[in-house]
Amino acid sequence: IFTEYVTSYEDPPTQGIAEAGKFGHAPVVITGLGVGMLSVIVPTLAIGITVIACNEISGLYGIAVSAVGMLSTLGITLATDAYGPVADNAGGIAELADLPDSVRDKTDKLDSLGNTTAATGKG
C-alpha cells in the first residue's frame, strides 16, 4: 500500500516530482531518486524484521530457511519479466522479415500477452 502511495500520480510524492520539473532536469532526477528510495522503505523493513525474527527463533538455520523462501519466488519472477521482451522481439523480427500478416497477427497476440505479463510482474 505504501509503494502504491509513493508511485501513484494522484498522490503527493509523484506530484512533487512533476513540480520539480519547473526548475529543470536535475531536480526531477534528484527528486525521483529520492522518492524511489523512499518507496522501498516498508518492504526493506519487513524483510529485515523477518530475518531478525527468524534468527531469534531458529538461529542461522532460520535465516537460511527464510532466504530460501525468498529465493523460491525468483524463478517465476524472472520468467514473468523475461517473457514480454522476447514476445516483443518476435513481433519485430516478423515485421522486419516481411513475413505474412498471419504471422504478425500471432506475434501481436503474444506481444499483448507479454505486456500483460510485464505489468503483472511489476506489481
Image: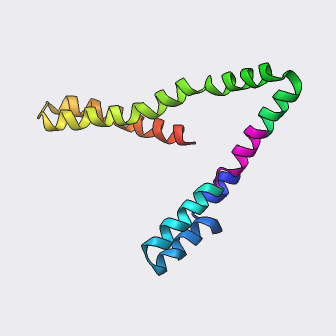
In the image, 14 versus 10, the foreground residue is 14
Work out which residue is located at the far right of the displayed protein and give it.
57
For the stretch drawn in magenta, the main secondary structure is helix
Q: Which residue is drawn at 62% across and 25% down?
A: 71
Depicted 34 relative to depicted 100: above or below: below
Residue 74, horizontal then vertical, whole percent: 56, 27
Q: Is residue 8 visible?
A: no
- Based on the displayed image, in which of its 4 quarters is residue 11 positioned? bottom right
Which range of residues does the magenta coloring cover? 39-48
Q: Nearer the viewer, residue 51 or 101?
A: 51
| Percent of width and height locating residue 47 | 73, 38
Residue occupying the far left of the picture? 98
Q: Residue at x 17, y 37 (%)?
A: 95
Q: Which residue is at a point 46% across and 39% down the rendered structure image?
A: 118
On the picture, is 65 further left or further right than 18? right
The C terminus: image quadrant: top right
